[in-house]
Amino acid sequence: MTLTAEQITYLLADNGLLKTGADFKGEVEHLAYNSQSVRPKTLLFIKGNFKAAYLEEALQKGACAIVAPMDFHHETTVPTFRVDDVAAAMSILSMAFYDYPQNQLALIGITGTKGKTSTAYMAYEMMNEATQGKAALSSTVQVITGPNPANHYRAHLTTPESLDLFRWMHEAVNNGMTHMVMEVSSQAYKKERVYGLHFNVGVFLNISPDHIGPNEHPDFADYLACKMMLFDHAEQIVLNADSDHFAPLIERAREDVPADGIWLYARKTDDLERSAEVTYETIKEDLQGSTFRLDEHGQQAEQLGLTGEYTLDMPGDFNQGNAVAAMIATRLVGTDAKAMQKALTTVKVPGRMQEITTKRHGTIYVDYAHNYASIAALLHFVKANEHVQKLTIVVGAPGNKGVSRRPGIGKAVNEQSDVVYLTSDDPQFEDPNAIADEIQAAITNPKVVVHRQMNRTQAITEAIKHSGPADVVVLAGKGMDEYQKTNGVDVPYENDWAIAKRVVHSLEGDK
């Protein structure tokens, strides 16, 4: 894989990004956006806070040209392509360097404030079943580009940087994958990680205030605007008619997508105000899973051929809606109902509603829930489906991101829990105690017992140790994450599931 100087110049100019060209006559054989991954004949992208020392290191390793913003100044003779937007340029050049892998994949993009990961895994399993293992995945939890363990990668971002994303997509194509599903975050559009990328199907699950803060979105309007950019870049849209802010969502969708390319789904009610092509209703549910019925309405929807009952081997009534969204989306790229039914009975999402049943310390749930909407839904579901004498939650909030979600976490705790252990959750450069202060300020219910233990392992240990047979402990936020982001470093962390299993074994002798 190479890019010539002429190709780089043409691609940047053709997309209106190039301001000044480079005196560069060769070709590049590698792309990088940090000095550590530079090797000979690398085109280096200068993005973010790129220090002069990093550039010196990159040049010593063999960087032969750079793409830099107009205000980047450095005393060097290295050929420099100056652009208005480095992130956009990186996406455009990366997809070209990796031979436009999206053209070889049936591509589904999923966005929403909650449910992206669960829906992505459902869609992935459905397509895998239908294609005999030829589906790829890009999720918050992991990236999967092929069937072998060597093709499974730990994810660091909900949506990878464009260079990494197109490299993984290229790898998926080389591995014979024909379909791919990915989570698309609001930050992916704000920071242009998917600039120029178009999806066969875009899925919009829901929207509520989140990711608002100094390092993310300045306000909800900006958050919503970035989320809705998926409508601009999808051939067809699957949209939840039960979502908050549905009016602006459907208005924007209709501006960008033809009427026969918009698929609405909603929970069935007696007085459904919104016309939806697909509705669903619960037949039965418990903490192990559920059975639901899907019905199609109108000539367009009947083309799907999905009407019937389905069994979902995942707890949480909210997951039925996620399943329906995944079913419609995958049907639009060729998956059949038989493959969907099988996938729904076997799908497992690492770190989502994983359950540990103990002898003397009740039931423990591990889940990635990390904002008001997801935590409130999770705690409500647990209390509605299980006799709970005492509900304890262990929770924190990340540092330097999602600042607006902290009061919401406290609100969910305030409404549903009996005991809370406020602890650390990727504090980054913030003091976890200060983050806990912001959460605790929203816990005004005097009946909620608040403990503060910033050592997350110890907090989990204490929560389980002090729970009885009829109690439930919810470990929220980190799921299967095996590191804590602290002061810019990924510090190894055992993960909530492993800690809970170990603690239960220590207390009860169970595996």
Image (cartoon, rainbow, N blue to C red):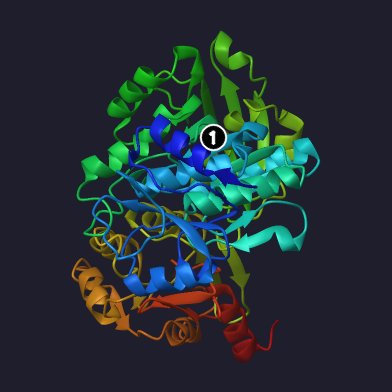
Above/below status of 223 relative to 393: above
Can residue 473 be seen? no
The quadrant of the picture occupied by the C terminus is bottom right
Q: Which one is nearer the viewer's eye here, 166 or 216?
A: 166
Instruction: Point out the residue furthest to the right here.
Output: 132
Instruction: Point out the residue furthest to the top here.
Output: 299
What residue is at 54 percent from the left and 30 percent from the top?
201
Q: Please state the total of marks drawn on the protein image.
A: 1
Please name the residue that numbered disc 1 is placed on.
Answer: 325
Residue 7 percent location from the top left of the image: 52, 37
Can residue 18 be seen? yes
* Quadrant in the rendering for residue 52: bottom left
Q: Which one is nearer the viewer's eye here, 29 or 396?
A: 29
- Name the kind of residue labelled 1 in the image: Ala
Secondary structure of the residue carrying numbered label 1:
helix
Q: Which one is nearer the viewer's eye here, 314 or 467?
A: 314
| Label 1 Cα neighbours within 10 Å, binned few <14 / some 14-19 / many ≥20 | many
